[in-house]
Amino acid sequence: MPRWRRTVVTVSAAGFFISMYEVTILDSKYSAHTAEFREASDAPSPGARVAFKASAYCKGVVTSSGVAVQTGIAASDPELLPVGSVVQIESLGVRYDGIYTVLDTGPAVRGREIDLYMWSCNEALAFGRRSTHVRVLRLGWDPGSARTSEVRSQK
């Protein structure tokens, strides 16, 4: 076989393998992205420890649940953590770690984000945005079921 044919076949084979490698890389990046999106949109179950992004807010007088704003209240995406959920925040430091009740929602709080209420706007701005872990202690709250069990216990 002449030398130029060997060169053409070798270059063609190398080009084929490089293109297949790039397709595989693109496919794996797409798979990783869809898995990340699916993980970010799946609702956590009670007892689960989940990675979240935490930020802080300081404005408002009443939460979306009708409760006055105060320390210990958090805002979250109601699709993931419905109003009434109780969570334990970890890895934010001694000052911010603890148990929070989700009693608010926010238009900018979507996905795995949690917004902690702080009285001081300067402190909220200094808090910024941090990575944290959230342990779900209770997922949501049904006020109807609490009243029903209360009525049953009184009879």
Image (spheres, helix red, strand yellow):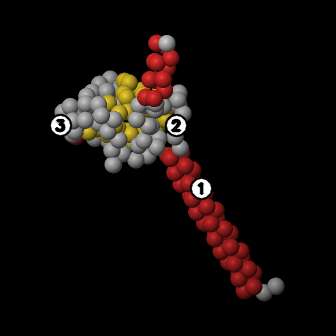
- State the residue at coordinates (46%, 18%): 151
Q: Earlier in the sequence, mark 3 or mark 2?
A: 2
- State the residue at coordinates (40%, 35%): 83
- Which label was assigned to residue 31? 1
Quadrant of residue 133 in the image?
top left
- State the residue at coordinates (19%, 37%): 121
Horizontal side of 19 relative to 150 (left or right) equals right
Residue lying furthest right: 1
Name above or below for residue 4 compared with residue 32. below
Q: Label 3 amino acid? A: Asn
Mark 3 vs mark 2: give the one in front. 2
Name above or below for residue 135 compared with residue 110. above
Q: Label 1 amino acid? A: Ser
Quadrant of residue 100 in the image?
top left
Q: Label 2 amino acid? A: Pro
- State the residue at coordinates (29%, 25%): 95
- Which label was assigned to residue 122? 3
**Residue named by callout 2:** 44
Q: Earlier in the sequence, mark 2 or mark 1?
A: 1
Secondary structure beneath disc 3?
helix
Cα separation, mark 3 vs mark 1, equals 41 Å
Q: Position of residue 11 (x, y in %)?
A: 68, 77
Q: Nearer the viewer, residue 22 or 129?
A: 129
